[in-house]
Amino acid sequence: MVKTFKALSLLLSYPTAEIQAAAADLKQALAREALVPAQLQGRLADLCDQLAKRDLIDLQERYVLLFDRTRSLSLHLFEHVHGQSRDRGQAMVDLMDLYARHGLTIAARELPDHLPLFLEFLSILPVDAARTHLAQIGHIVKAIAQRLDKRRSVYGAVFAALQALAAGRPSQGDLDALRDQPDDDPSDLMALDASWQDAPVTFGPPAAGMTAPGNACPAARATLALMDGGGAMRRSHDD
């Protein structure tokens, strides 16, 4: 398991008491594996420290405001390139097929294009393969990174790390297409209503991530197992 991708997945997940308790371990795992460049380790450490020390309700409110109420920061990857079009449905099917080819199914109500889930998938791949898959969403990662940096969000550290880990840079054309999309203001309630008018609504933190067929695990197990290779994603032959 590539623990860096597992750690980044957890850092981008809805904050829970389990993630708070594990924040120091996540920081150590990132530093020990050292896949993320040294100049970005400090930013990731700051995010881990904030997750560990800040009030959990405040962390959850900040997370929802950023990623759930701001469509331009959505962690659902295909939202940025397909919106609610039929193309998004086929892209979902293709992504689920990719997971299935590696012996994995989603043991949750989360959609397959949810970035923390995708990063959890990358964590089971060889590093070079993970970098290649990550490069395919590089334009989305960079666009979100720029929007988070504009807000001076500590979560920008994760997206900076993902850009550094990807094999190659996104095409300028793909990036420009995303930059042309409006950047939502979560305080503009009328704009939010219009933006999410036809979008599905879910409440609370996402459930567990991924597992081998027939081996669903609850979210608590995913966070408590953390960097030991257990949790919500396991290979079929691990049973």
Image (spheres, grey):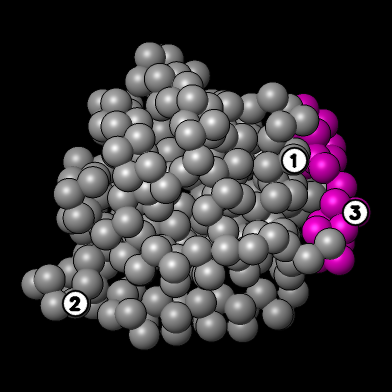
The part of the image, by quadrant, that contains residue 20 is top left
Residue 168, image x, y percentages: 64, 63
Pick whichever, 90 or 190, lies toward us.
Answer: 90
The part of the image, by quadrant, that contains residue 98 is bottom left
Q: Find disc 2 in the rendering and name its residue.
A: 236
Could you tell me which quadrant the C terminus lies in? Answer: bottom left
Residue 181 is one of the magenta-drawn residues:
yes
Counting other residues with Cα less than 10 Å from the Cα at mark 1, is it few (<14), some (14-19), or many (20 or more)?
Answer: some
Q: Amino acid at mark 1?
A: Gln
Q: Find disc 1 in the rendering and name its residue.
A: 146
Helix, strand or loop for disc 2: helix
Residue 212, image x, y percentages: 23, 73
**Among the two numbered marks 3 and 2 on one chain, the one whose residue lies closer to the N terminus:** 3
Residue 65 is one of the magenta-drawn residues:
no
Identify the residue at image location x=31%, y=75%.
104
- Report whether 27 appears left or right of 153: left
**Among the two numbered marks 1 and 3 on one chain, the one whose residue lies closer to the N terminus:** 1
Q: Find disc 3 in the rendering and name its residue.
A: 180
In the rendered image, the residue lying farthest to the left is 239
**Among the two numbered marks 1 and 2 on one chain, the one whose residue lies closer to the N terminus:** 1
Helix, strand or loop for disc 1: helix
Identify the residue at image location x=52%, y=69%.
133
- Report whether 65 appears left or right of 46: right
Could you tell me which quadrant the N terminus lies in? Answer: bottom left
Viewer-nearest of labels 1 and 2?
1
Vertical comparison of 159 with 102: above or below: above
Pick whichever, 45 or 38, lies toward us.
Answer: 38
Q: Amino acid at mark 3?
A: Asp
**Residue 117 seen in render:** no
